[in-house]
Image (spheres, rainbow, N blue to C red):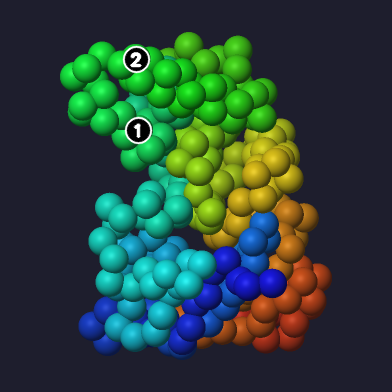
Amino acid sequence: MNPLLCVRDIHLSFGGVRALNGISFDIQPGEIFSIIGPNGAGKTTIFNCLSCLYRPDSGSIRLEGKELVGRPPKDLAALKIARTFQNLGLFEQLSVMENVLLGRHHLMATSTLGNALRLGSTRREEAEHRARAEEILGLFDLRKLAGTAIGVLPYGVRKLVEIARGLAMEPKLLLLDEPVAGMNHEETAGITEAILRVRDRYGTGMALVEHDMRMVMAISDRVMAIDFGQHLATGKPAEVQNDPRVIEAYLGRAA
Ligand SMILES: Nc1ncnc2c1ncn2[C@@H]1O[C@H](COP(=O)(O)OP(=O)(O)OP(=O)(O)O)[C@@H](O)[C@H]1O
């Protein structure tokens, strides 16, 4: 199988700090791939490179063969990559449905000519976008909240809506940045279930950065551990968890 994402030997320094020092990994289609490591290991920096916010000093990042390095962040949706952030990026006054529809903005391409001639394409197109958004809301059991303003919803539900909005972009790769940070057990279980449903329904490849090790170990197909911008181990969750280099990295920091 050809990998969905191919990251090869990326390096990135900030002044004297080597944030990434030769990181390489692949993500397969439909795979849930987690990146773990102690604070400051370089996880967010990898995500920022994958979402074109940072440009590596060297190395390559290809999604289905297309080079991402050097592309501006505005190209991300067209490159079929969506990202959720540690802090929610939703519009509080807008409804759940409106927020999810915003994820489809780049797909809304009703032609100016069609509008001008009033061929009805806008209404048809809008109906299609709504149908897709409703399908995603249904996947997350959120249909009954479609008209509710984000601002009144609890954090766990907002996070689901943020993932739904990312999914509405129809990404090949979904980047989930600490999706269960600050959540209680029940909320974490809800997000975990939602992520598994996404994979099963749409076959979306997902990269996850998350400090909740129990969640990471339960959900990931493979895990990559890094420290000081360097690769430590990649493999099945239990293999990586028991790898002496990984244990050392975590214990070393805790001391
Ligand atoms: N924009 C930046 N300017 C300067 N240094 C940076 C920048 N972004 C990251 N770094 C440095 O790169 C290193 C890796 O940081 P990064 O945020 O990627 O770690 P992390 O693994 O995500 O940590 P955490 O788990 O605490 O979020 C750190 O030493 C950090 O200070």
Residue 193 lies in quadrant: top right
| Observer-nearest of 186 and 65 | 65
Observer-nearest of 160 and 107: 107
Instruction: Indicate the amino acid at tag 2.
Output: Gly
**Residue at position x 46%, y 26% in the image:** 129
Q: Is residue 26 left or right of residue 98?
A: right
- Is residue 22 rendered to the left or right of residue 75? right
Quarter of the image where one finds residue 57: bottom left
Q: Is mark 1 within 8 Å of ligand 1?
A: no
Q: Quadrant of the N terminus?
A: bottom right
Report the quarter where the C terminus lies.
Answer: bottom right
Residue pointed to by mark 1: 108
Residue closer to the observer: 200 or 36: 200
Residue drawn where x is 71% and y is 60% of the image: 220
Instruction: Give the CA separation, mark 2 to mark 1.
Output: 14 Å
Instruction: From the top left corner, tell me how far across and down residue 164 is, in percent.
Output: 53, 35
Can residue 70 be seen by looking at this rendering?
yes
Residue 100 position, x and y percent, is 45, 29
On the question of residue 105 being in view, the answer is no
- List x then y, in percent, for residue 20: 42, 81
Q: Position of residue 233 (x, y in %)?
A: 66, 82
**Tag 1: residue type?**
Met
x 65%, y 44%: residue: 202
| Vertical side of 251 occupied by 64: above or below | above
Checking the image for residue 123, the label placed there is: none
Q: Residues within 10 Å of mark 1 (few under 14, many from 20)?
A: some
Dot placed on the residue nearer the N-terminal end, 2 or 1: 1
Q: Which residue is mark 2?
A: 120
Element marked by disc 1: loop
Mark 2 is surrounded, within 10 Å at the Cα level, by few (under 14), some (14 to 19) or many (20 or more) other residues, namely few
The structure residue drawn at horizontal position 42% and vertical position 65%, both measured from the top left corner, is: 50
